[in-house]
Image: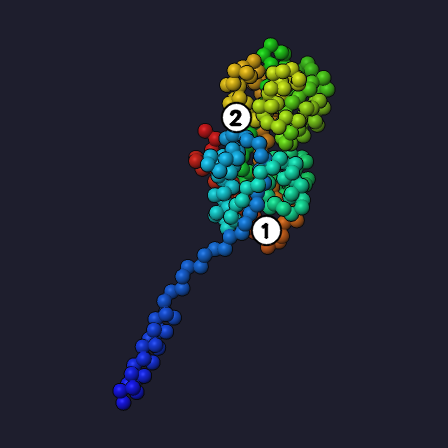
């Protein structure tokens, strides 16, 4: 009799335990993340890209934060832009920072709205400025060099800066786009190896504090103010379309927050 009562009691306790387990709320389902490979130029472009994990630039911070919002676990890959393009074509990366130049618009996919480039989902807009040697006469009116033919002027710029190279080439300027950094381009100008240089405004402002470059000055009007986006491959898998659209939207929203603006 004792053993029968114990068996009944154990069965009752087991049934009660099953009831409470089944009635308990299920743990919150964690959102799965996808490794998202983003290629950035290995050249620093402060304040946007520093290539320093301990001191990320505005672009690096926005890309990571936007990825966290939509389920992308961002990994940065650092190479010259030309190598990034090759890796994109080979499917070795998922996205890369790219200006909305005529060349890039043909080979990459950018965020669109109503059949046009969606500028609200850009990650940055920059100024590309002209730099000359003090004492030389060059005047840019916003669309052309006053009194000078483009074919008579050799312009130096950074190797990977398609946003400068494309319009300069289209206008007929002679180009020396072989500088590895903005500093390299300005040193070529200072040493009279080129007539003018074009570089990112923030970089130029910082570099001209160097005594070695104090003989250089910036022209009042910029060459262009290109917009930069995170471009993806045109062959993006269909199952990622919605997630990438949400990522671009998150980038556009974050860019407008005070903590992600150029001060």
Quarter the N terminus occupies: bottom left
Residue 166 percent location from the top left of the image: 67, 30
Q: Position of residue 191 (x, y in %)?
A: 63, 15
- In the rendered image, is residue 174 in sight? yes
Along the viewing direction, whichever of 60 and 250 lies nearer the viewer: 60
Q: Position of residue 162 (x, y in %)?
A: 64, 32
The residue carrying mark 2 is: 202
Give the alpha-carbon distance from disc 2 to disc 1, as whole Å: 34 Å
In the rendered view, does 250 fall on the left or right side of 102?
A: left
Q: Quadrant of residue 172?
A: top right
Given residues 109 and 57, the one toward you in this image is 57
Q: Would you say residue 145 is visible in this rendering?
A: no
**Residue at the image point whose x is 66% and y is 36% from the top:** 82
- Mark nearest the camera among 2 and 1 is 2
Pick whichever of labels 2 and 1 is earlier in the sequence. 2
| Label disc, if present, on residue 241 of the rendered structure | 1
The residue most toward the top is 135
Residue at 55%, 17% (x, y): give it: 213
Q: Residue furthest bottom?
A: 1
Q: Residues within 10 Å of mark 1 (few under 14, many from 20)?
A: few
Q: Which quarter of the picture shows residue 131?
A: top right
Which of the image's four quarters has the C terminus?
top left
């Amino acid at each position: 009799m004792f053993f029968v009562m114990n068996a009944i009691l154990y069965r009752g306790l087991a049934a009660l335990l099953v009831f409470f387990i089944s009635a308990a709320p299920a743990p919150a389902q964690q959102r799965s993340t996808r490794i998202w490979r983003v290629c950035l130029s290995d050249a620093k472009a402060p304040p946007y890209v520093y290539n320093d994990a301990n001191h990320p630039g505005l672009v690096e911070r926005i890309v990571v934060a936007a990825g966290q919002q939509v389920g992308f676990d961002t990994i940065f890959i650092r190479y010259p832009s030309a190598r990034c393009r090759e890796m994109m074509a080979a499917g070795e990366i998922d996205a890369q920072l790219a200006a909305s130049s005529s060349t890039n618009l043909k080979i990459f996919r950018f965020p669109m709205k109503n059949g046009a480039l969606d500028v609200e989902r850009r990650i940055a807009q920059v100024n590309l400025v002209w730099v000359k040697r003090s004492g030389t006469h060059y005047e840019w009116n916003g669309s052309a060099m006053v009194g000078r033919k483009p074919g008579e002027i050799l312009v130096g710029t950074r190797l990977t800066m398609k946003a400068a190279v494309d319009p300069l080439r289209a206008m007929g300027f002679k180009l020396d786009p072989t500088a590895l950094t903005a500093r390299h381009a300005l040193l070529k100008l200072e040493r009279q190896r080129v007539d003018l240089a074009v570089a990112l405004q923030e970089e130029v402002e910082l570099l001209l504090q160097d005594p070695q470059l104090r003989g250089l000055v910036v022209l009042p009007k910029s060459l262009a103010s290109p917009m930069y986006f995170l471009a993806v491959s045109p062959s993006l898998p269909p199952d990622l379309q919605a997630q990438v659209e949400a990522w671009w939207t998150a980038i556009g929203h974050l860019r407008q927050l005070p903590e992600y603006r150029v001060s």
